[in-house]
Amino acid sequence: MDAQRFDDLTRRLSAARTRRSIILGIVGSGLAFLPFVRPDDAAACVKIGGVCRTNKGNVSRCCGGGKCGRKRCVCPRGKKKCGDRCVLNDATCPSQCQEPSDCPGSDNECGDRTCNGNQCGRNNRPAGSLTQNQTSGDCKREVCDGSGNIADQNDDTDAPAPGPCETTACENGVVTRTNLPAGSDCPDGVCNGSGACNSCVAGSACTTTFPGACAAGTIDCSTGEPICRPNVQPGQNPEVPGDGVDNNCDGVTT
């Protein structure tokens, strides 16, 4: 082998050894297994160099004593999840409360805060449970929604009591009122067709504005208002000369 070819071979072997050293160094440091982390995945729990870290390189608090799963902390055998940490199965989780009032939120008819084993919780009544705050005749009912909240539901059986001259009903939670026809009987007389009860005694005697034989009348309540109808209509009877009575109600006697 001539000197030129020997020098070329020496340079190639040297470069290969250098590349091999670089690769082994990267592998040994763990950098060869850096995972790709999306910039918007700020809460990701990932493994970098054998350590659970956030994608910003900080040691992640989401896996205290645990290992990295698919972007979440997985506690190893013999440990349990306690908030955002892994603790021994027989360990006690940090206390959240001593009594229910220590827990966030508020109590109402549909749910109470609880404190069991120093951990906060909530005891909610089943959905549809009635509260004590009910308003009669509003076509609604106040119920629990199952999540501790109070809500209104339509109740078409909760119609208000009707007045003397109307009927009432509920339609999809809305009150509707319908007036009885004019002349319908009501406690004080008759309905006027607009929902009012007018004092009217049908058939009672009254005096009309007509003269003579047409002055006598009878109360008519058919329109919802008391009207005095003459018993004898003007012009119905002929005049009787010499009787001194205005028989035809024209205002003249013979």
Image (spheres, rainbow, N blue to C red):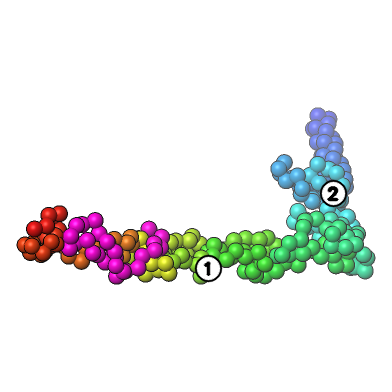
Assign a secondary structure to mark 2.
Answer: loop
Q: How many marks?
A: 2
Which quarter of the image is occupied by the C terminus?
Answer: bottom left
Foreground of the two, 67 or 83: 83
Q: Residues within 10 Å of mark 2 (few under 14, many from 20)?
A: many
Residue occupied by mark 1: 158
Residue 138 rendering spot, x and y as whole percentages: 54, 62
Q: Which residues are magenta?
A: 194-220
Q: Name the residue located 54 percent from the left edge and 65 percent from the top edge.
A: 137
Residue 8 in the image: above or below residue 68: above
Residue occupied by mark 2: 60
Q: Name the residue located 77 percent from the left edge and 64 percent from the top edge.
A: 112
Residue 115 in the image: above or below residue 4: below
Residue 170 in magenta stretch: no
Q: Is residue 9 visible?
A: no
Q: Is residue 73 visible?
A: yes
Disc number lying in front (1 or 2): 1
Q: What amino acid type should be assigned to the residue bearing mark 2?
A: Ser
Foreground of the two, 56 or 174: 174
Residue 242 in the image: above or below residue 28: below
Q: What amino acid type should be assigned to the residue bearing mark 1?
A: Asp
Assign a secondary structure to mark 1.
Answer: loop
